[in-house]
């Protein structure tokens, strides 16, 4: 078997099967909130306590869920290929399953940072309140990329795709930018495999010459694909 570079792009669909609610419902609400109330600098400025409590609840929910067969199958893939996971999810289920190389585009729930220094990051599983300060004396905020903010890991993620032999897209509509544009960094010779129970072919995917669509949930489609990739 020839060892290949495989880049995996994951979205809310893979975490939803573990019981984590997806980012937005059909009405554009997240847990009953307009996303701009809890996922924007403007929302933070308007109601810091609401935003802190929102992410406290999400952080506590992580203690009640675990990774699924989709996450676990990606760990098995590492035994045979060089695997990099680029995720839009802010949970730690890939890491808990055992994946070794995970890039979080939109931040991480179990990390908080200073409002004054985005590089002053602390790991926590506990609640954060108004008045909880970073070591520089400034308020702690969720280490989450909000709407209107730069995506600092985007350049690192895009470079990983440049030499990918295979790109696997799991549980994301590839409609939200800038993450949706990542697949365009893959070489035209790269195999693109898209796993989703209700796949939506984005503009970038229509340009892919070697696209395979697998209509399946992550827990069913990923283990099946991984078996195939590890048998070649």
Image (cartoon, rainbow, N blue to C red):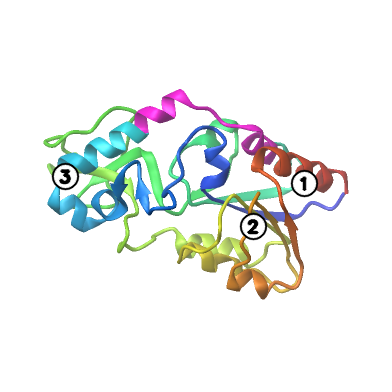
Mark pair 2, 1: CA separation: 16 Å
Mark pair 3, 2: CA separation: 36 Å
- Relative to 42, 144 lies left or right: right
What residue sits right under mark 2 in the picture?
199
| Residue 85 lies in the magenta stretch | no
| Residue 65 lies in the magenta stretch | yes
Mark pair 1, 3: CA separation: 43 Å
Dot 2: element: loop
> Majority secondary structure of the magenta segment?
helix
Depicted 83 relative to depicted 176: above or below? above
What residue sits right under mark 3 in the picture?
48
Say which of marks 2 and 1 sits in front. 2
Marks 1 and 3 in Cβ contact (< 8 Å): no
Determine crowd level at label 2: few under 14, some 14-19, many 20+ residues with C-alpha closer than 10 A.
some
Dot 3: element: helix
Residue 160 x %, y %: 59, 61
174, 192: nearer the viewer: 174
Q: Which mark is residue 225?
A: 1
Q: What is the magenta range?
A: 59-75
Residue at 53%, 69% (x, y): give it. Answer: 181
Which is more N-terminal, label 3 or label 1? 3
Depicted 232 relative to depicted 186: above or below? above
Residue at 32%, 60% (x, y): give it. Answer: 147
């Amino acid at each position: 078997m020839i060892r290949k570079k495989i880049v995996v792009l994951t979205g809310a669909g893979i975490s939803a099967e573990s019981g984590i609610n997806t980012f937005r419902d059909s009405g554009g609400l997240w847990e009953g909130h307009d996303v701009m109330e809890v996922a924007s600098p403007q929302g933070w400025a308007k109601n810091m306590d609401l935003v802190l409590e929102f992410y406290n609840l999400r952080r506590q929910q992580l203690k009640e869920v675990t990774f699924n067969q989709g996450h676990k199958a990606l760990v098995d893939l590492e035994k045979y290929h060089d695997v990099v996971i680029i995720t839009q999810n802010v949970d730690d289920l890939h890491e808990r399953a055992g994946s070794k190389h995970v890039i979080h585009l939109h931040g991480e729930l179990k990390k908080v940072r200073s409002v004054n220094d985005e590089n002053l990051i602390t790991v926590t599983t506990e609640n954060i309140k108004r008045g909880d300060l970073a070591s520089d004396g400034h308020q702690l905020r969720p280490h989450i990329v909000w709407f209107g903010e730069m995506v600092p890991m985007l350049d690192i993620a895009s470079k990983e795709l440049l030499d990918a032999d295979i790109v696997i897209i799991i549980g994301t509509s590839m409609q939200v930018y800038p993450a949706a544009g990542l697949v365009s960094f893959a070489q035209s010779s790269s195999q693109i495999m898209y796993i989703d129970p209700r796949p939506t072919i984005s503009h970038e995917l229509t340009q892919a010459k070697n696209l395979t669509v697998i209509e399946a949930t992550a827990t069913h489609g990923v283990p099946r694909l991984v078996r195939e990739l590890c048998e070649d």
